[in-house]
Every structure is written in structure tokens, then in C-alpha cells.
Image (cartoon, rainbow, N blue to C red):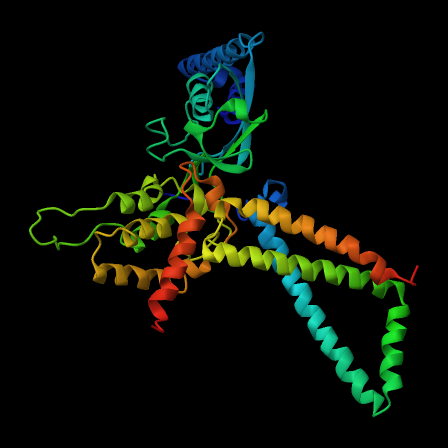
Amino acid sequence: MSQSYDRGLVEDFGRWRDFSAGMWAWVFHKFTGWVLIGYLFTHIAVLSTAIPAAGGDPSIYTGTLQGLEELLVVRFLEVGLLAVAVFHILNGIRLLFVDLGVGLTAQDKSFYASLVLTGAIVIASVPTFLAGAI
Amino acid sequence: MSTQIQEGEQTEDEQAEEQGESVPANQQRRMQEKRERADSEERQREEAESSLDDEDTRTLKVFRYDPEVEGKKDPRFDEFVVPYRKGMTVLDALMWARDHYDSSLTFRHSCRQAICGSDALFVNGRQRLGCKTQLSDLQNPVRIEPLPHQEVVKDLVVDMQHFYDQMDAVEPYFNDDDVPDGLEEQRQTRENREKIKMSTRCIWCGACMSSCNIAAGQNEYLGPAAINKAYRFAMDEREGEAMKQERLEILEQENGVWRCQTQFSCTEVCPKDIPLTDHIQELKREAVKNNLKFW
């Protein structure tokens, strides 16, 4: 062989239209996983500063959280967080079954099912999360 | 569209014309013959194409690259219009294009019945076996590229060495001299044969490895085909215990079964419908059972 041509990432994200169910499940699972890790660190940062700042006075902590809840964007972010968490949980259950070798021929259907269920749960949660904000 | 290199010859011709009489007579004659040959080739080509006018045709967009020829070093796509007939496969169309338009169009093929595993190609954004893919199932124009994640040697031919190395790494052969008492042969139950049935169907075409995101690039991941090969022997009841342990040790390595992220791409593209992810997952469980013994 004299020479060869490296085409680089032929099947990179530019080919997302050709992705199949299993690939999308993997992409979404990674994405939601990172979002959840990001949220957990923010969560710890907010709580660990709000509680000591209160210094024995619970009203400061309550005030911080109520102040956050008054912001419309925070309400929407909460809906987003729920969507991300629910999808990660449902796809995680799907992956458990995949690891156990149960129903591998239905892996695409179970991915679509977890998407639909996530959508349904998120829509059902909207009245609760946005109550009073709009 | 023609892959014959025209530019070089043309400049030569122009030079000859400029110089006029100073060119020796026989060279002029050679030039003349060359021009006529080029003309007749072009005419033949036009005839072939115009004869297709009232026929049902399909357009192939084929990846072309040849590092050894000046002017073809830049990768590009060539279009070939081929007549369509019922039952025509991608491989048939490629062969028609090669025979009628450009004999330098290079691709691997041999048996034409999905057994030799030579013609795995990237057709319309997916790894498929050329001889097993019907043109009627594809959108026109049909885009044909060499397998992704492997280096292209020429046109549609990729360097399969890495794939073969990974296949060899799992020692894909039966290796047990022990014969059960009183027998002269290794016997296998029907159930066991049924269990490994699908895994024996691998034709080494490399479609799965090419579709796998994890195996892409310089990754040392064994790849779906090699793990499937290991499954075929590890799950075979005729294989001795020592050999099975050795095989599992190879699979448990950093680049063995645990690299699989269950994207199901390999299972999706396998032309022989082998449930590759299924087999990889079973070997993962086998590896865990082999190392965690609480009982």
C-alpha cells in the first residue's frame, strides 16, 4: 500500500439524520447525565451558601428560595430539570434491561416509549410548576 | 463526469499547436491519433448515455480517490447514470458503471450473494452489503462511499488490516484436543448449536466495526465482529475450560467487551442479522460471573 486517504470523522454529528434509535438513546443519555451532574453541583453550591448565611435564622434561607421561585425562568428551568431527570431514569431502566439481555429486539421501541412517557409526565407537571408564575 | 484525465493531454495538444511545424511529423501523428482516440471515447460515452434516454435509470454518486495518479489525488464524487432493471443491486449498478463508463472504478466484490463479505459499502449514509442492497429500496441518487473509519486505499477500497488484526486478537479458532471418553469426535447438542447459530454467520465484511462509534479512529476496542467471534467459541460447549478462560481474559481487558456502550449501531447494520449487541451483553454478564464468585 503506497498511500491512503484519511477522511476524518465521516460519521460525526453532521450525520445526525442517519442516527438510529439506539444512537439517539446514547446521545440523550450522555447529555442528560451531564446536565444532572451540573445541576447537582449548582444545588450543593446554593444550599451550602444559603444555609450558613442564615446563621440560625431560617427566614434568610426561605427568602432565598422564595426569591428564586418568583423568577419565571427558574420555573421553566424546573420543568426542564424534571424532563431531563425523568428521561435519564426511564432510559436508565431501559439500559438495565439491555444489560440483563431482556428484550433487546425491542430496544428501539423502549427508547420511543421512554421519550413519550417523559413528554407525558413533563406536560402533566406544567400546571404544578408554573402555578402562580404566569 | 469522465474520470479520464483530460487536462494534461489538452495542454500538451495546445503546446503542439503553438509550436506548429517545429514538432516532428511522427509526433504530430501520435498527437492526432491521441486526439481521435479521446474523441471516440467521448463519443462512445455520449452514445452510451443518450441510449439511456428513454430507459428507467438510476444515478450513482460514487466516491473516487486514487493517490497514485496525478489529478485524481483529490477525493471527489463521480456521477454515473446506469439503466435500471428489476432486481438490480448496488453492486450490479457499480459493475455496469465500471464496464461501460470507467474501467478504473475500483471496488471489492466476489461471490455476489452475500457470503464472501467483500463489498460492504457506505450507501446512502449507512453500511450495507452492495450485493444485498436493492436499488429499489434506495433514494435516487444513490451515494456510494467506502466504509467510514477505515483508511481509503483507492475509490471504494478500504484498508481492512486493523479489522483483521482485531479479529485475530480473540484467537478465532477451535482449540481443544480433548475428545470425550469413548468417542472419536466432538459432539454438540442441538440446543447449543441453536444458541451459537447466529454468531457463526459472520462473513467478516467489517460493516459493524465501521458503524461503531467507539471503534472509530485509532481506538483499540476489539469491535463487535471480533467479540461476536469470541462468543461463537466461548459459548460453544465443545470448547475446553482452559481455552474459555483464556478467551474471557482477552474479552475482559480494557478494550474488550466493556467498551461497548450499547448504541446498537452494529446490530442495526449487520447484513447477516447477527444480534451483535445481544452477544456482547451476554459476554459482559459472563465476564462478571467469571470474576465475582460469591457462591
Residue B240 is drawn in which quadrant? Answer: bottom left
In the rendered structure, the answer to whether residue B158 lies left or right of residue B192 reads right
Taking depth in this image into account, of B251 and B117 the one nearest to the observer is: B251
Residue at x 69%, y 72% (from the top left corner): A40
- Residue B108 appears in the figure: yes
Which quadrant, please, contains the N terminus of chain B? Answer: top right
Residue at x 50%, y 11% (from the top left corner): B48
Residue B54 is drawn in which quadrant? Answer: top right
Taking depth in this image into account, of B175 and B3 the one nearest to the observer is: B175
In the rendered structure, the answer to whether residue B139 lies left or right of residue A40 reads left
- Residue B74 appears in the figure: no
Taking depth in this image into account, of B96 and A46 the one nearest to the observer is: A46
The residue lying furthest to the left in this view is B182
Taking depth in this image into account, of A86 and B135 the one nearest to the observer is: A86
Location of residue B256 in the rendering, given as x and y in whole percent from the top left corner: 39, 59
Residue at x 85%, y 57% (from the top left corner): A127
Location of residue B41 in the rendering, given as x and y in whole percent from the top left corner: 47, 14
Q: In this picture, is B193 found above or below B116?
A: below
Q: In this picture, is B18 found above or below A89?
A: above
Which quadrant, please, contains the C terminus of chain B? Answer: bottom left
Q: In this picture, is A22 found above or below B285?
A: above
Q: How many marks?
A: 0
Location of residue B20 in the rendering, given as x and y in whole percent from the top left corner: 53, 16
Q: In this picture, is A47 found above or below B208?
A: below
In the rendered structure, the answer to whether residue B176 lies left or right of residue B232 reads left
Location of residue B275 in the rendering, given as x and y in whole percent from the top left corner: 42, 45
